[in-house]
Image (cartoon, rainbow, N blue to C red):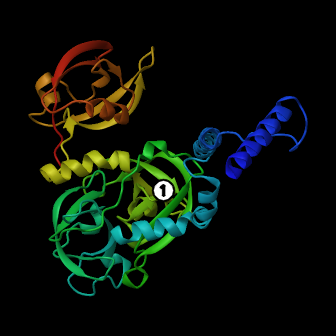
Amino acid sequence: MGNKNNYKAHEEIRDAMWKNAESGNDIFGEIIFRKNNKKNYFKSFLKVVSFILIASISGGVTAQYAINKEKSTKDISGGLSPSALVKNRGIADNPILAVSQKVSPTIVGISNKEKGIWDTPEESGSGIIYKSDGFIITNYHVVEGATEIKVKLSNDYVLKAKVVGSDAISDLAVIKVEASNLPVAKFGDSSKLKVGDLAIAIGNPLGDQFSGSTTAGIISALDRKINILNEKTGEQTIYKVIQTDAAINPGNSGGALCNSYGEVIGINSFKINSVIGSEGTGFAIGTNEAKEIINDLITYGKVIRTAIGIYGGTAISVGADGVEGVYVQDVARGSGAAVAGIMPTDIIIEIGGKNVKNMEQLSNVLGKYKVGAKLSCKIWRGGKVKEISIILSELKAQ
């Protein structure tokens, strides 16, 4: 009975407390209801994910901007960023060193004597490794009349060589050693040269004791034409060469003239230089002039040139109208000119549709055709112009 009364009293107190709370009486103070924990965690999670997404997008935009800026820098500086430019400043400041290190392994010494090899410039020359299996380019006069040819590589290893082909007109020759995996020189485009460009000559200027020497200067002139007389035949050869003030001495013949990129743009020739005989003036046969000749020497052992079969070829101007052309002194038997009826004292004024005023222009026209080609020709004879046809023949070595 007592327990029931106590329980009833307890219930009445609880009801009174809730009623007072509902009626606004502040018995326990303000009642505060906590938010649902799951809902709170979900909102926090959304905030974190949103922050990560915003950070990722912002980072991507920043990275793309940096890449575009770096690319722009590369375009302006020729493919090198500012950091790379600083890193490579040593090479840029001394391109001669870089070129020498790159090209020197491809330069060889050449001896044309069995005894006393490389001791003097007269018994030595230089060469450029053209193919890794042993083809080497040099000057014709370096191997002319040689009974035995020896080649010394940059590592001082000596090999016997044989002549593959030679051409006295261009003063070029190709020799070969039995070897493989040799370092090869890279040939550049000599038509892109400009006066004032850096020129670096590498070779053996004064015999074996000065092998691998490097001299430097600039390109002094382009397309120089040098006439050299063959004392044996009386023939004149016109060399189209590069002029440089880089020192080219006797043993340099057949060596490389390089640009600042380490590309061979000329084959040095002291023979041409000796004709001029001037200090600070060196000459090299441009690679664009030499490539076709070199390939002919490797393929055929000789250079196949077209000819019409005349001698002399002196430029002349005659007549009241000032007719200009190539004066014919003599005609080779059985040649295209002889078959066509050309005679001594004729003047060739046009061939292949091109006016010609001298032998150089005539040779340039013939060089565009192959042996066997038939060309129209105009000659001046006895005050009149006569038209004939000539079949081109092969120019025979003198």
Q: Is residue 247 above or below residue 122?
A: above
**Can residue 398 be seen in the rendering of this structure?**
no
Estimate how packed mark 1 is, as few (under 14), some (14 to 19) or many (20 or more) residues with alpha carbons within 10 Å: some
**Can residue 169 be seen in the rendering of this structure?**
yes
The residue that appears at 32% across and 49% down in the rendered structure is 290
In-image side of 254 versus 297 (left or right): right
Residue 191 percent coordinates (x, y): 44, 42
Foreground pick, 377 / 305: 305
The residue that appears at 27% across and 45% down in the rendered structure is 292
Kind of element beneath mark 1? loop
The residue that appears at 50% across and 63% down in the rendered structure is 200
Q: Is residue 46 above or below residue 97?
A: above
Foreground pick, 308 / 217: 217
The residue that appears at 48% across and 43% down in the rendered structure is 192
Q: Residue furthest front?
A: 1
Q: Residue furthest right?
A: 25
Q: Which residue is mark 1?
A: 261
Foreground pick, 276 / 184: 184
For badge 1, the amino acid type reads Tyr
Number of marks: 1
Q: Residue furthest left?
A: 334
Residue 311 percent coordinates (x, y): 25, 38
In-image side of 151 versus 63 (left or right): left
In the rendered image, which quarter is residue 119 located in?
bottom left
Residue 379 percent coordinates (x, y): 28, 19
In the rendered image, which quarter is residue 376 located in?
top left
